[in-house]
Image (cartoon, grey):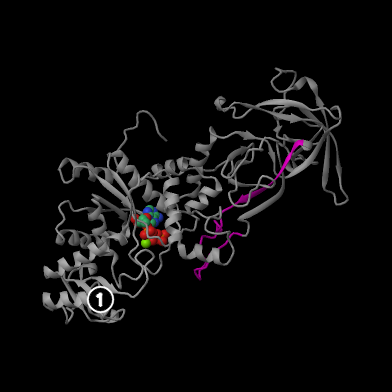
């Protein structure tokens, strides 16, 4: 991807910032990530987090984490905690700059009063349905509300009464007085405050009027001194309203809104509604089920913040919507793990291999590099003896051409150990192979410089009497890739093979200290991470993070 001659070109947001700084609109920049605490964050949010944080870093500016908690119906403290954890895990350090929009309710109220005093807002008694009717359509202008010309005094009194709880929900709203004939429907006197007798998760019952998003958001930005308020494309049509709010409220350094395209990945589920259903129906094991792409699920599965960051940087920032192939994310994951992780011996689908000419009771301790491509990770020893486990599919009774692993009469290398030759095998009454008998050649020890002959296959193994038993979970996409994510009726097209649980896997005995979130390469089988929910010292549980091979090409 990257090469030394590549000219690093700036994305369109950086170009806007450069221009704003050069023209003196701002002295320094400030960005924010403004989640609504109504669910868990997913990979798409990671893009927004890393983009905002990255810009603040790049320009030596400030980055705020701000909970946009102006809508009391759906918000929960639980989500505040999980979001904080996710942002921190991604490495977006907000350095204590943690804010809640609900802390600004008083200032928002004052801002509304200011607009009323300027003749720029009015209390309207139309019902929600009537407001919709009066609004007009894309092709027809709207009609003025009969309450549009109330006096400033009357509006001030009514708004105060709204605040004091004198009206039922929906009885009155405060609207910005802009232009009912605007070609942009968002500008046709939008509602900026509503009456809602609801308990807020932070302010309790203090307020019974709540500001609407389009009014609240620019005020939050302005209060915090945000310069570039970066959001996703669906807000593009709201930008004139954003600009109207900050202009009418006469902020000295008005923030500016910039939109970019959301990150979409193929064949994954990000919609909260769908994930909620999967969780509630018990199809997945909570919001952090490793098959999901919530940040907590990715963390549990064994993704690293570095890989997510590299992926998001490569995906770039654009204004045009598109989906990125999920394998691209996996590509960056493999790249990140490749040199960092120890390469361990682990047999997922075991069958016994017995070396008939190896002395019974003898044990050798073989030395192995933890990662042949990264000597800094050091070496370890692995016990070797007469009885081993190997992968069931590393043996075939009647192999096809080009099968270089074990079959009667064939010789292979046991990784880090010796050549062994298959002499015979034993089946149980159902015809299942239960033992493979071999002989080994003492001269062929790995690292001994033996050059007598070559073998085409190398397989991995674990010494049976020393093996650690573990559970391993393999994952596929939760939705069927071929058929698409959704069925015609809108239901999810679930992949019945999204989870495979292997209960009897054998690991080399070097996992005594493995703890939640530790990850390893299991040679030939992929990267695996100790599950943070279900793994214990006595019963290790691993999630496969990603397999080793990919069809993905950069
Ligand atoms: P969802 O639609 O998944 O429920 P949301 O947009 O409602 O997400 P918010 O809490 O409002 O969630 O989002 C916080 C920030 O994250 C917003 O600035 C939003 O634009 C941004 N964001 C949300 N989804 C994506 C995405 N897929 N790609 C990039 N940014 C996103
Ligand atoms: Mg939202």
Q: Which residues are magenta?
A: 466-495
Give the vertical position of 400 relative to 293 (above or below). Answer: above
Residue found 37% across the figure and 71% down from its top: 199
The picture places residue 326, in percent across and down from the top left corner, at: 49, 49
* Foreground of the two, 95 or 505: 95
Give the vertical position of 263 relative to 360 (above or below). Answer: below
* Foreground of the two, 113 or 466: 113
Q: Is residue 17 left or right of residue 300?
A: left
Marks counted in the figure total 1
**Would you say residue 323 is visible in this rendering?**
no
Residue at which label 1 appears: 164
Give the vertical position of 87 relative to 453 (above or below). Answer: below
The quarter of the picture where residue 247 lies is bottom left
Q: Is residue 372 left or right of residue 461?
A: left
Residue found 22% across the figure and 53% down from its top: 256
The picture places residue 88, in percent across and down from the top left corner, at: 42, 46
The quarter of the picture where residue 405 lies is top right
The quarter of the picture where residue 395 lies is top right
Q: Secondary structure at mark 1?
A: loop
Magenta segment's dominant SS is loop
The picture places residue 320, in percent across and down from the top left corner, at: 33, 53
**Would you say residue 81 is visible in this rendering?**
yes
Q: Is mark 1 within 8 Å of ligand 2?
A: no
**For ligand 1, which image quadrant applies?**
bottom left
Q: Is residue 541 left or right of residue 117?
A: right
Determine if the magenta segment contains residue 473: yes
The picture places residue 371, in percent across and down from the top left corner, at: 59, 29
Determine if the magenta segment contains residue 256: no
Residue found 84% across the figure and 27% down from its top: 358
Mark 1, Cα crowd under 10 Å, few <14 / some 14-19 / many 20+, is: few
Q: Which quadrant of the rendered structure holds the N terminus?
A: top left
* Foreground of the two, 537 or 275: 537
């Amino acid at each position: 991807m990257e090469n030394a001659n590549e000219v690093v070109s700036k994305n369109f947001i950086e170009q806007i910032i450069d221009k704003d700084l050069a023209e003196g609109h701002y002295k320094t920049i400030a960005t924010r990530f403004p989640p609504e605490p109504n669910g868990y964050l997913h990979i798409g949010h990671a893009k927004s987090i890393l983009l905002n944080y990255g810009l603040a870093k790049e320009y030596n500016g400030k980055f705020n984490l701000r909970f946009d908690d102006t809508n009391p119906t759906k918000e929960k403290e639980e989500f505040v905690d999980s979001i904080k954890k996710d942002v921190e895990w991604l490495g977006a350090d907000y350095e204590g700059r943690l804010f809640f929009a609900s802390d600004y309710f008083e200032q928002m109220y004052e801002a509304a009063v200011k607009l009323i005093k300027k003749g720029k807002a009015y209390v309207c008694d139309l019902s929600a349905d009537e407001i919709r009717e009066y609004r007009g359509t894309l092709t027809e202008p709207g009609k003025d509300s009969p309450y549009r010309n109330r006096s400033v005094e009357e509006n001030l009194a009514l708004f105060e009464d709204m605040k004091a709880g004198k009206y039922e929900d929906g009885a009155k709203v405060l609207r910005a007085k802009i232009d009912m004939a605007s070609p942009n429907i968002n500008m046709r006197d939008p509602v900026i405050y509503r009456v809602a007798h609801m308990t807020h998760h932070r302010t309790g019952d203090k307020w019974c009027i709540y500001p609407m998003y389009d009014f609240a958001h620019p005020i939050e930005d302005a209060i915090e001194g945000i310069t570039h308020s970066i959001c996703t494309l669906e807000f593009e049509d709201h930008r004139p309203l954003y600009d109207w709010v900050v202009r009418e409220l006469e902020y000295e350094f008005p923030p500016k809104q910039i939109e970019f395209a959301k990150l979409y990945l193929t064949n994954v589920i990000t919609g909260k509604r769908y994930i909620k259903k999967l969780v509630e129906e018990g199809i997945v094991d909570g919001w952090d089920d490793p098959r999901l792409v919530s940040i907590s699920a990715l963390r549990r599965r064994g993704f690293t913040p570095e890989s997510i960051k590299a992926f998001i940087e490569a995906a770039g920032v654009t204004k045009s919507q598109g989906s990125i192939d999920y394998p691209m994310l996996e590509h960056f994951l493999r790249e990140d793990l490749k040199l960092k992780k120890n390469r361990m011996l682990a047999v997922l689908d075991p069958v016994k291999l017995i070396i008939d000419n190896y002395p019974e009771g003898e044990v050798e301790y073989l030395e192995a590099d933890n990662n042949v491509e990264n000597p800094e990770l050091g070496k370890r020893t692995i016990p070797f003896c007469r009885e081993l486990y190997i992968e069931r599919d590393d043996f075939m009774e009647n192999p096809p051409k080009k099968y270089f692993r074990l079959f009667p009469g064939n010789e292979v290398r046991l990784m880090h150990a010796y050549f062994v030759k298959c002499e015979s095998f034993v089946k149980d009454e159902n015809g299942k192979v239960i033992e493979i008998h071999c002989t080994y050649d003492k001269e062929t020890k790995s690292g001994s410089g033996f050059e007598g002959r070559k073998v085409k296959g190398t397989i991995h193994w674990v010494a049976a009497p020393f093996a650690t038993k573990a559970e391993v979970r393999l994952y596929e996409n939760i939705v069927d890739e071929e058929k698409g994510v959704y069925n015609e009726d809108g239901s999810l097209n679930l992949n019945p093979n999204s989870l495979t649980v292997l209960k009897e896997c054998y690991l080399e005995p070097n996992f005594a200290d493995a703890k939640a979130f530790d990850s390893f390469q299991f040679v030939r089988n992929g990267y695996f991470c100790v599950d943070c929910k279900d793994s214990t010292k006595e019963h290790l549980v691993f999630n496969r993070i990603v397999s080793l091979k990919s069809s993905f090409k950069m």
